[in-house]
Image: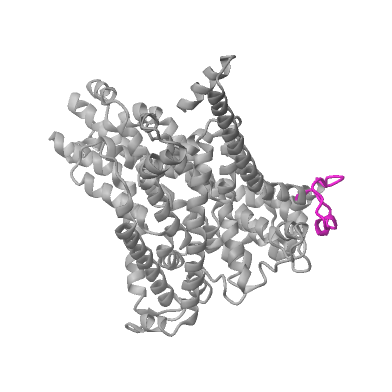
Amino acid sequence: MATQSETVSVRRAPGSRPAIGRLVNGERLWRALIWTLLLVGACVMLLPFLWLVTSSLKTELEVFQYPPKWIPNPPQFQNYIDAWTTKPLRHPGFGIYLKNTFFIVILNEIGILGSTSLCAYALARIDFPGKNFWFGIVLSTMMLPAVVLMIPTFVLYSRMGWVNTFLPLTVPHFFAASGGGAFFIFLLRQFFLSLPEELADAARVDGCSEFGIYRRIMLPLAKPALATVAVFTFIWTWNDYMGPLLYLAKDPNKWTVALGLAMFRTFMWQRTRWDLLMAASTMMIIPIIVIFFLAQRYFIQGIVVSGLKG
Amino acid sequence: MGRLRARQPALHGRGRQRRQDVSVQTRWLGRLWPRTAKGRRTVTGYLFMLPFILGFLLWFLAPALVAAWLAFFDWNMIQDPTFIGLGNFRHIFRDTLFLQSLKATTYYTLGSVPVSLVLAFLFALLLNTKVRGMAIFRTIYYLPSIVPAVANAVLWNFVFSTEFGLVNALLRALGLPKVPWLQDPEWAMPALIIMSLWGLGYTVVIYLAGLQGIPEVLYEAAEVDGAGRWAKLRHVTIPLMSPVIFFNLIMGIIGSFQVFTAGYLITAGGPQNSTLFYVLYTYRTGIQYFNMGYAAVLAWILFFIILGLTLLVFRYVGRLVYYEAL
């Protein structure tokens, strides 16, 4: 970036020599090139989104037109209402799916924030024998691909009669045993390690218990890291397809939005209504995009930590 | 849970100061509570760790043991499991679908991981410059990677539709023939690979974090030595980014060997099993055909494949990684 300041100073000098003039032009050309490449890439990235949204606003006939219309006229906002209210084959529809998803999300947030922060606090702040061993275990569970445990976990849940209940999708979160549990423990541990020990010492002198220090001092300070955990938990629970497919597929009243959307297409055995499917997909993506814009900072932070641990 | 655990240390603190005040019902807790500081730290530590330890035992160790046990049995979840020794392992060598799923997954990995690794690196380099509108560009590149897998599958199913899909419309506009993307065994996998590239924003963000961690001083020093853009990229950026590239390579391999939703929802493994991903085959064997023993063996094999690949990559690519002597 040293070249940047150079350019600025050169630009201010009116009678600049031809050699430096070429440098300015080179720098400008370079920037224009970067900008063009970024723009082309951005268009490619945005195109499927645009396609999704325009298709969701088309009539059933317009969907099949060539060349494709990019601005449907008039836009069929009715598609969104239709997609929301369609209840094929007496299935309960997206209202119920949304309610189920939020129920699971709320339980998972409570479970994962509690369990991972407790564990992370112990690993960062309490000096107990076997600490390094357990930290090793945390890291090793992160390495194990989730798929390996899919079959035996399914067997165990069916033996316990947990299939077709919300239990398999929620209870593991209370024991930090969900997909991202180990990663969250790692993330929170790093954060707790960065907080000053003096605060805890002061509280200890005042007779505060270890749990009190965790609850009243450390948790409030760890809000940014907890927000990262909360955001990722929301996104992963909202997006999760395999879990609901394994454990809720047989009972439509318990379907999540992801499962409902996947099944939505299979109802259309006569003809696929792409306009409605695109409207339903857009509705599923919107909350994720909203969350992303509200919590962008926490998001990027989480990914950065996951990348830096490697 | 939390409240219950909270009570014990609190009780203890009170018990030490005003022992007489402790009620009879709670005194036994005070006796259990260790006297030495080290003992107290041990008990507190393990109480805090309790949720994770239980979770580890019940959701990792127990299923792993069950999977190891299942591998030697033939079981359809209805009748009693029958011990068949190494029968499940022997079956692998006669199973053409196993080979096909391995081939499909390898094809997908070879097609998507290297391309996304390079493309994401280029994007990250572009996104690390200081030009106007950078925040918007970064958001646009990242957004596709958080689109829910199901919505992604529905969308791309439509994008690749032969008659009225976006990709064929673009090809037609360029005067090229239509491609039966999802109907042709030759084209189905390339279609899924293209789709996976759309979600490379996650990799871009990890690269970006790495790029921003490179000290500016190094570039300045390189400039003093007369290094141009290419030389700075070649001798400063790439060596310093090699651990991050390596991390993304390993995560890419691990991730692509576990792809499921794309194959399940878009192509259902077809046409002609050309997109029968390994995890999809495991899912079918276990959850749809209730062949639990064999599915457990398939899962174990996947574990060892991923482990083996990771070790291989560490062995042969890891030595190219430049670790700063800082």
**Residue at 61 percent of width and 56 percent of height:** B150
Q: Residue at x 20, y 47 (%)?
A: A130
Can you name the residue that lies furthest to the left here? B36
Query: What residue lies at 83% left-to-right and 58% top-to-bottom?
Result: A66
Instruction: Verify whether residue A58 appears in magenta.
Output: yes
Secondary structure mostly seen in magenta is: loop
Is A204 positioned to the left or the right of A71 in the image? left
Q: Residue furthest right?
A: A74
Magenta residue check for B106: no
| Drawn side of residue B130 relative to residue B222, left or right | right
Point out the image quarter for the N terminus of chain B: top left
* Residue drawn where x is 76% and y is 50% of the image: A56
Image location of residue B311, percent across then percent down: 31, 61
Q: Tell me where residue B241 appears, x and y as whole percent.
A: 39, 43
User: Left of A215 or right of it: where is A276?
Assistant: right
Q: Nearer the viewer, residue B317 or A269?
A: B317
Give above or below for B42 relative to A142: above
Quadrant holding the C terminus of chain B: top left
User: Which region is colored magenta?
Assistant: A56-77
Q: Is residue B270 above or below residue A249?
A: below
State which quadrant residue B275 falls in.
bottom right
Is residue A249 visible to the viewer in this orientation of the structure? no
Q: Between residue A54 and residue B89, name the one nearer to us.
A: A54
